[in-house]
Image: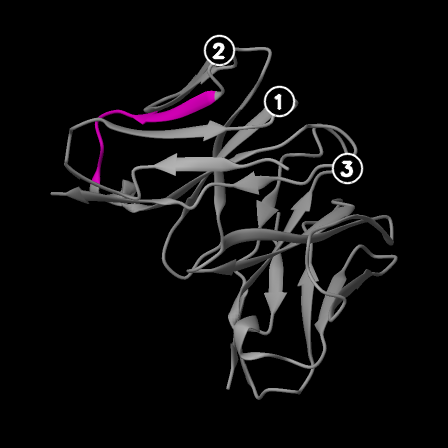
């Protein structure tokens, strides 16, 4: 089955800095890679996703890059703000009828004011 | 539009009991998935229902079951609770149109088994 590794487990940055979280996956059939943000006491919230037919996707301060050959994808947050502090999860799956995502273990991002 | 709602939000049970959790998806969403989240195992897929049929199932014992009603609301049931079932149980729904993979999560039900 699919295996997703996520690093780092904790990331501490100063407000205004950039943050990068990396994930690797094992199943070459995976073609859908979402990123979720989970704040304390809440469920995960989809913040950005990418499909294997594109290499990069951007949404304001958030971007995701995908390297299919190396089987890794990364989340980039620029100009971090204290409200970006949360746990971030990556996931990988094969899009289609049988959608069973495999999640990374999560990265706790702490943005210091 | 109202988001995914889950009830109850918190639950305390004892070993051997059974529990039923409820999920109301976003209006118009027909797919509902359930996940278990624990510090040790992370986020793990339990099962997915679409149009009242279980479409996918994760690697969990038969004590975990679910169902979906004609209005897309879903319930999951855990029988003969074990201490290790203590977790946050998350429900996610997917839209009727567009990519089915786009999931919207509810706030979860935190279950504590004593």
Res. B9 visible in picture: no
Badge 1 density bin: few <14, some 14–19, many ≥20, Cα 10 Å = some
Distance between mark 3 and mark 2 Cα atoms: 27 Å
Above or below for B107 versus B80: above
Distance between mark 1 and mark 2 Cα atoms: 12 Å
Label tally:
3
Between label 1 and label 3, give the one nearer the viewer. 1
Magenta residue check for A31: no
Q: Do labels 1 and 2 touch, CB within 8 Å?
A: no
- The rendered magenta stretch, by its main secondary structure, is classed as strand
Occupied quadrant, residue A94: top right
Q: Which residue is mark 1?
A: A31
Magenta residue check for A73: yes
Q: Which residue is mark 2?
A: A55
Above or below for A61 versus A43: above
Residue in view at x 66 percent, y 34 percent: B101
Q: Position of residue B107 (x, y in %)?
A: 52, 59
- Closer to us: B49 or B16: B16
Q: Secondary structure at mark 2?
A: loop
Q: Do labels 3 and 2 touch, CB within 8 Å?
A: no
Q: Quadrant of the C terminus of chain A?
A: top left
Q: Position of residue A74 (x, y in %)?
A: 39, 24
- Closer to us: A20 or A85: A20
Q: Which residue is mark 3?
A: B96
Res. B1 visible in picture: yes
Magenta stretch in the rendered image: A72-81
Badge 3 density bin: few <14, some 14–19, many ≥20, Cα 10 Å = few
Return the chain for callout 2.
Answer: A
Say left or right for B113 vs B59: left
Return the chain for callout 1.
Answer: A
Q: Do labels 1 and 3 touch, CB within 8 Å?
A: no
């Amino acid at each position: 089955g699919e295996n997703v590794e996520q690093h780092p487990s904790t990331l501490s940055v100063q407000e205004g800095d950039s943050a990068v979280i990396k994930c690797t996956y094992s199943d070459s059939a995976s073609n859908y890679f979402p990123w979720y943000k989970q704040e304390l006491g809440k469920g995960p919230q989809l913040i950005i996703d990418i499909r294997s037919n594109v290499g990069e996707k951007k949404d304001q301060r958030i971007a995701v890059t995908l390297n299919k050959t190396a089987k890794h994808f990364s989340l980039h947050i620029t100009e971090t703000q204290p409200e970006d502090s949360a746990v971030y999860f990556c996931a990988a799956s094969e899009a289609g009828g049988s959608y069973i995502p495999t999640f990374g273990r999560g990265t706790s991002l702490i943005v210091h004011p | 539009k109202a988001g995914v709602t889950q009830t109850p939000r918190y639950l305390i049970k004892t070993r051997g009991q059974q529990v039923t959790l409820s999920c109301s998806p976003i209006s118009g969403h027909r797919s509902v998935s359930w996940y278990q989240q624990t510090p040790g195992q992370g986020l793990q897929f339990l099962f997915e229902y679409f149009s009242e049929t279980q479409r996918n199932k994760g690697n969990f014992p038969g004590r975990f079951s679910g169902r979906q009603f004609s209005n897309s609301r879903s319930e999951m049931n855990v029988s003969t609770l074990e201490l290790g079932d203590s977790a946050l149980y998350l429900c996610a729904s997917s839209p009727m149109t567009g990519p089915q993979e786009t999931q919207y999560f509810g706030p979860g039900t935190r279950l504590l088994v004593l």
